[in-house]
Amino acid sequence: MEKVTVEPLRMVDFVEYVRCRPSGYFLVDQDSPELPTEVLRAVAWDALHRRDGRHGQISVEIGSDLSFTVESDQRPSADERERLLPELFGSLLDMFDVQRWAPSAAAALSVRTVIEVWLDGHGYRQELVGMDPTGPREECMAPKPFGTRTTFHLDPSFCGPGEAIGWALRPEELHGEACKEHPSPARFPIHDLRAEAEESLGE
């Protein structure tokens, strides 16, 4: 009787999985020039859509060709609050439930992520490399009673030379097609610091 050797199963690391199959999360492959814009679109979509089906209030700031910040007024669910408060050393990204995968997948493609969470007037801040915190979360000022603000610095070696977040983006481009629940796209501010820098240089 032939002896069969079975290799042990290996749990694939989430960061490794996202980097091997970015199209599974962001619709395009690694070599697509649209990847940085699609990452921003996924994070903005996640921040905009509340669990009750309504649109929240968000803002987007594009800091450079491969960095952006999304601020949202989403209030953490009861389960997310439980994950946030007791654990001081875990990742703040772990607060989000599995349906909100976009921030974690974007962090997997980033060399640096900075996340702030505001809850009941208290602020928590943390920096990560990939999905790994660089240290424990710190308390910070909470400018609003609740919400999140997350900044992603996408990995230039992964995105490739010349790739960049699209210019002159409009809210409907990041929101995608109108939601089935809402016939008209939500409006929100998009601040592109690259354009402001070019304007100041041209003066």
Image (cartoon, rainbow, N blue to C red):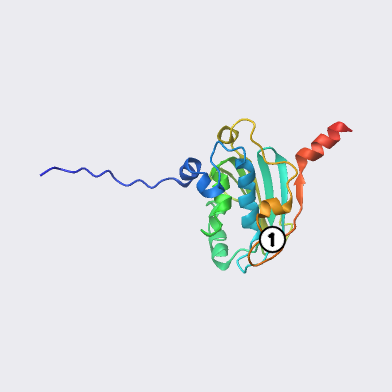
The furthest residue to the top? 161
- Residue drawn 68% across the image and 47% down it: 69
The N terminus appears in which quarter of the rendering? Answer: top left
Mark 1 highlights which residue?
73
Q: Quadrant of residue 155?
A: top right
The furthest residue to the right? 203
- Residue drawn 64% across the image and 44% down it: 37
Residue 11 seen in the current view: yes
Q: Relative to 182, does residue 5 appear above or below in the rendering?
A: above
- Return the x and y of residue 105 as percentages of the image width and height: 54, 48
Task: Report the number of discs.
Answer: 1
Asked whether 110 or 55 is in front, the reply is 55
Q: Specify few, some or many for label 1: CA neighbours under 10 Å numbering under 14, 14-19, or 20 or more.
A: some
The furthest residue to the left? 1
- Return the x and y of residue 18 as percentages of the image width and height: 50, 45
Question: Would residue 98 be found to the left or right of residue 122 on screen?
Answer: left
- Return the x and y of residue 83 as percentages of the image width and height: 53, 60
Q: Quadrant of residue 201?
A: top right
- Residue drawn 89% across the image and 33% down it: 203
Mark 1: amino acid = Asp
- Return the x and y of residue 111 as percentages of the image width and height: 58, 38
Helix, strand or loop for disc 1: loop
Question: Would residue 44 be found to the left or right of residue 136 on screen?
Answer: right
Residue 124 seen in the current view: no
